[in-house]
Image (spheres, rainbow, N blue to C red):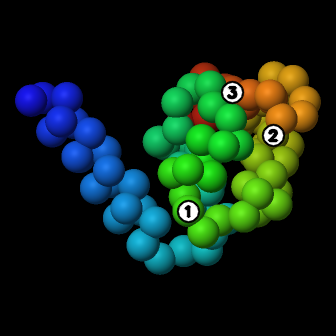
Amino acid sequence: MSVLADSYAQFATFTSDARSGGSKQDRVRDYVLHHAPATFQIGDVRTALPGVSDPTIRLVLGHLKAAGLVEADGVGRGATWSRLPDARG
């Protein structure tokens, strides 16, 4: 029962984030820094934020990488991204 309750709470958080104000870039940044697992793929962000395009996700990840908040672990379709330890700051 607790698994179901936790899943529902997480779903509610994701849907409220998707409807909240702010640009799509702001939503991607917030998701990556505060809600995504420590290691994730672009597909994870795409699933969590429907309606946000891959180019927008890549743009934000590029900005976060330049700021030293995330790093890419590989290239191409199988690439994963890691949030750096002090990124939630």
Gap in Å between the C-alphas at discs 1 and 2?
22 Å
At 47% from the left edge and 42% from the top edge, which residue is drawn?
35
Q: Nearer the viewer, residue 11 or 62?
A: 11
Local SS, label 2: helix
Q: Is residue 46 above or below residue 42?
A: below
Name the side, left or right, on which 89 lies relative to 12: right
First along the sequence among labels 1 and 3: 1
Q: Residues within 10 Å of mark 1 (few under 14, many from 20)?
A: few
Q: Nearer the viewer, residue 36 or 86?
A: 36
Where does label 1 land, which residue?
50
Q: Is residue 84 above or below residue 53?
A: above
Residue 11 position within the rendered picture, expressed as x and y whole percent measured from the top left: 32, 50
Gap in Å between the C-alphas at discs 2 and 3?
10 Å
Name the side, left or right, on which 88 lies relative to 61: left
Kindly identify the amino acid type of the residue bearing the numbered disc 3. Ser
- On residue 82, the disc is 3
Q: Is residue 78 above or below residue 17?
A: above
Which one is closest to the eye, mark 1 or mark 3?
1
